[in-house]
Amino acid sequence: MAIGQAKIPATVVTGFLGAGKTTVIRNLLENAGGRRIALIVNEFGSVGVDGEVLKGCGDALCGEDDLIELANGCICCTVADDFVPTMTALLERETPPDHIVIETSGLALPQPLVHAFNWPEIRSRVTVDGIVAVVDGAALADGHLAFDEAAVEAQRAEDEALDHESPLEELFEDQLNCADIVLVNKADLVADAALESIEAGLKARVRDGVTLVRSRQGAVPASVLIGLGAAVEADMAARKSHHEMEGHEDHDHDDFATFVVEIDAETDREALLDRVARAVSDHPILRLKGFAAVAGADARLVVQAVGPRVNAYFDRPWKPGETRRSSLVVIGETGHLDADGIARTLQG
């Protein structure tokens, strides 16, 4: 990102399956006011948002390649494997988007996802403009958190990547705790007295300053949902999850640790990749990424590792006068990384 260039804002839309997230997003895209919007969809069974709708966000400024589906499981449980690489690829496009909208799975804990915006390759280029929690007003009026709680539980059972068993009430609490706007959708299906009671209950549960908005069929002006400037990623101390408020730390990717391993001497390509593979195999590294100076090569080697997968390619020649060195960023969970041991493995 060029010096002085503003960060790309991102809006995260949470809510249980059936609450109306997709309808809200469809309306947002159709009234985007000329913004080029990229949409990352993580909700299973989500329908109704396609390339044609995306093109409505600005006279064909947005196309089918701006719709990205993450279908490997709950986004907060596949941060390293799916979300971070997707965001990185999006930012490295020749023409990055003006705004990013992320529709989460209804089972996603919003806090770990927001923490991912502090990962090195993202934090300098993107900011979380705001969190929109869509709640089903009609379901709440009937005493339920979701229109079809059985369908939500079935969704949980189908997600092999899901690594948290939070009850629906706790997930609902986490979504409210993280929200900047709570959208009470399907308000037209609820009697006024019941709607006022629902809103009173929601106001008692959210942080001061959180806005409650009624919506019918997800129709809310784009100016209400985006441009909040909340910089959520820097405000997570005020948006604690249920387990954080109870003093638990059992959702194990809420906090990430990052450190850099420098390798001064030029190295053999295959030997370096072997050491990277050994490091990610022997240690709980979520992601490794960086550049390397390879002996006998005039170009810089990009090294990336996610889980057991290690990839490398030459991206550009070394610039005149540029110091040829290897610098690898290691990312993992706080308290789980042996930085000295990893450094010894990588440095050989």
Image: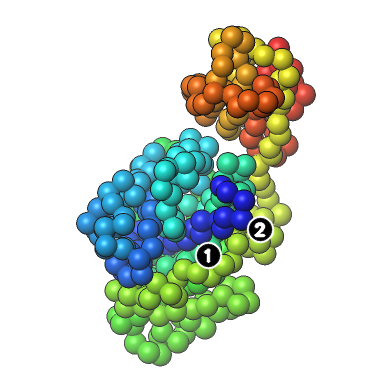
Q: Is residue 72 above or below residue 301?
A: below
User: Which disc is residue 234 wearing?
Assistant: 2
Q: CA distance from mark 2 to mark 1?
A: 12 Å
Give how far across and how far down residue 326 sits, in percent: 66, 23
User: Which disc is residue 219 wearing?
Assistant: none
Q: Nearer the viewer, residue 293 or 118?
A: 293
User: What is the secondary structure assignment of the residue under circle 2?
Assistant: helix
Residue 126 visible in rendering? yes
Could you tell me which quadrant the C terminus lies in? top right
Give how far across and how far down residue 135 sits, in percent: 42, 69
- Residue linked to disc 1: 130
Q: Nearer the viewer, residue 218 or 268?
A: 268
Left-right relation of 249 to 15: right
Label whose residue precedes the other's in the sequence (2 or 1) = 1
Residue 24 visible in rendering? no
Assess disc 2: are there few (<14), some (14-19) or many (≥20) residues with their C-alpha within 10 Å of its C-alpha.
Answer: some
- The amino acid sitting under disc 1 is Gly
Residue furthest toward the front? 320
